[in-house]
Image (cartoon, helix red, strand yellow):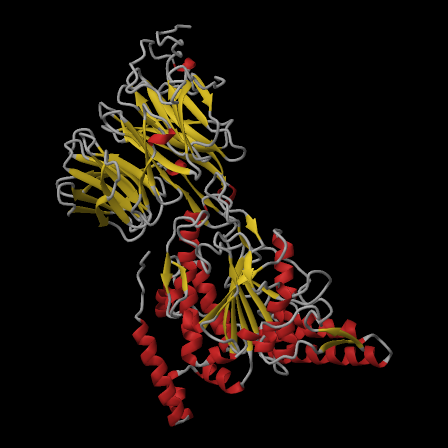
Amino acid sequence: MRREIGCNRIDHEVSRRSFVAGSAAGAAAVGGLLTPAQAEAVKSGQKRILQVFLQGGVSQFESWDPKPGTKYGGPFRSIPTSVPGTHISELLPHTAQRMHLLSIVRSVDLKTNDHRIGRLRLEKGRTTGEFPYVGAVASKYLAPPNPPLPGYLHITTRGLEDNTNAFLGAQHAQLKLLGVNAPENLARPAGINEEAAQRRNEFRRLANERFAGRGGQPAFTEAFDSSFEMARRLMKRKSLFEQEPSAKDVERYGSHPFGVRCILARELLNNGATCVKVTHHGYDTHAENFNFHLEQLDEFDKTFCMLLDDLHDSGMLESTLVLVYSEFGRTPKLNQRYGRDHWGASFSVALGGCGIVPGAVVGSTNADGTEVAKREVRGGHLFHTYFRALGLDTSANHDITGRPVPIGDPAAAPIEELLA
Amino acid sequence: MTDLAEDKSMSDPQTGNRPAPPPLPENPIDVTQTHVVAEFKHDIPLTTCRIDPTGQFVFAGAEDFHVYRWSLSGDDSSKTIFAGHQSWVRSLDFSRDGNLVFTAGYDHQIGVWNAADASPKPIRMIDAHKGWVRWVRVSPDGKLLASCGNDNLIKLWSIPDGKLQQEFVGHKRYPYAAVFHPDGKRLASFDLMGVIKDWDIETGKELRSIEAKFMWGFDQKFRADMGGARDMRFSEDGKTLIVAGLTEVTNAFAGVHKPMLLLVDWEKFEHRHKWKDDAYKGMAWGVCEHPDGFLVASGAPQGGNKGMLWFLKPGEEKPFHSVQLSHCARGLDITPDKRQLAVPQFDGKLCVYQMTAPLNISGTARTS
């Protein structure tokens, strides 16, 4: 289906050319194109992650691995992309034009059809055990000292109270943001001025030192300390949640909840966040799979591409790993309600940006999409790939009070052909 | 409720073919005796069906992108493929003489075909809408074809040359169905959100609009809309617009809702009667009016596979009869003589039901 493009790619090409020319001319020229925050983000050299989680399980047939005209292919057609030979679903016309910035893994087999287990296997890169999520690992190893924002921010509207940091410190746990609302209690209590607040904070620090000096376990105070520190940083950046998105941004990204959440995600990344996860709900389509994918992917497609464009045009994409994923895909076979059910045996994940070869397609499914045909990929492979792309040695160990724990699953390895 | 036993009395035991055309049964309409008289098999789920105006053929769309034609007096071997669309066909209609069949494709196209060709090829494929073409209907005078699609437009096409005649702009969400009023001057349409519009065919202007929000639901958890007409027709006298669909959506993504029929008083343009089956979670996929003063509707359940035929009198709360189908219905049509029903099913079968008592083996009427 053709949809209103909203903006012409040539605009972005011009913008990129201008950016390159500006870079060559010097920092002053760059400063004219980027916001100060973006310029700082590019200059800092920090690496970061943007996770776009299509909750419920986006259909691989209706997105990254279309099979039109086959037994289970459904009604949608495939369309060519900016990568010659690569086709994706007609439901992603904007993404198709930017496929040269992304790659697709079409052969993911998580060996589960369970929402929670699928999510955990992708986030932890392990099939079992308590291990930190991608975002927590990013917070631990990619965030600079004294980061301006909590390391792992998740913009969502629903539940999911997992133990995301596992054995990593509490400061690396997911901070869940309910939509674009600021976390609660960011404002200083009435009656406490700045000076009083500083004195209270200093008193807390001294009490912690005294506790530690008397043999108290540092882990107890570190967890509290990190919470206070996180709150302090967020209070300083309160304006990020208070500013209304510009009319231009709303026009580009859309006024729907996913649109304004992606605008916030961009602002958080621009302002020093290490991992930002945005959840787009509504893909668990046991009924009316096609009508719902029309709606959901129509919302996702342009909005995601505006965010991708902004990262690309600012130069931040080179240092930002972008992931688009679900906890599983959907069954090849349609049920009687025009639905597709849970299917973790052969589905797709898209990724791009920092350290990832652009425009690649890894693996394949068979003609009817019922199983992986080539290059089976599991959660562990993806986990290794993400962090190797970001420059982290995933064969190294976490140091858990002297006990080594491998960062990546030793039974898995990176997808080398995806690594730039 | 009737237990179905296939009536094989009309089949030739030597060839498996039924004599063509079958003599009209003498038995009077008695829906309590509704029984299967033919079953055409396909290996892919069907999406819709229509019987041509001559009553010779039944056509069905399938999830393999093709349309299939069977002879109502023949058997499976009469199956003829209409290949030309690149996606599913969910709506069909015919020229008044039955010579042409028009197909609405999710490939954004309308197909025009000779209905009786032995090896059908499209006469014309029209790039009709930006997005799915959800519905096609021929005007009472046979000169115009109405379509609606995912570009939120209703369009009128000249049948002789396939040229666009008129666009009706006004629906904000996908229109699911559009049908001509029998007077040929007006057109009704029904969209995802339960908005019903009345259009002037001559000017293309929207004349009236009412809402049937109870045939739409917004799933708060998943944040998605579910609604729309799955079938829509005018009564033959033009006084009632009849819509089949769903109501009381409690979980859109699991398909938890109830089947609904809505009768709209066309003159007053207000809801006359709403019928839902509280005991049956699922969807009403088709509806037909019978000249004996009742409606027939087909449905599919949320779980299990037992489709349903409901026989209802307008205004009454409960069906006076129902028939359990061998699988989930995906539509419904009635023969021109109003004695038989065709039901396309999810299991790929197209079942033909006769609304009379079965004939005995000698072909004479058997009353019960």
Q: Is residue B210 visible?
A: no
> Which image quarter: residue A277?
bottom right
Q: Is residue A419 left or right of residue B337?
A: right
Q: Quadrant of the C terminus of chain B?
A: top left
Q: Is residue A243 left or right of residue A182?
A: left
Percent from the top left, x then y, of residue B348?
43, 35
Q: What is the total number of numbered labels drawn onto the structure image?
A: 0
Percent from the top left, x then y, of residue B235?
26, 25
In depth, the one of A265 and B340 nearer the eye is B340
Q: Is residue B86 left or right of residue A111?
A: left
Q: Is residue A348 visible?
A: yes
Establish if A157 lies above or below B182.
below
Q: Residue furthest bottom?
A: A25
Percent from the top left, x then y, of residue A241?
50, 69
Q: Residue furthest front?
A: B14
In depth, the one of B105 and B64 nearer the eye is B64
Q: Residue furthest top?
A: B367
Establish if A330 lies above or below B117.
below
> Which image quarter: residue A313?
bottom left
In depth, the one of A224 and A299 nearer the eye is A299
User: Looking at the image, which residue is at 37% across and 16% down?
Assistant: B10
Percent from the top left, x then y, of residue A144?
61, 82
Establish if B260 lies above or below A327.
above
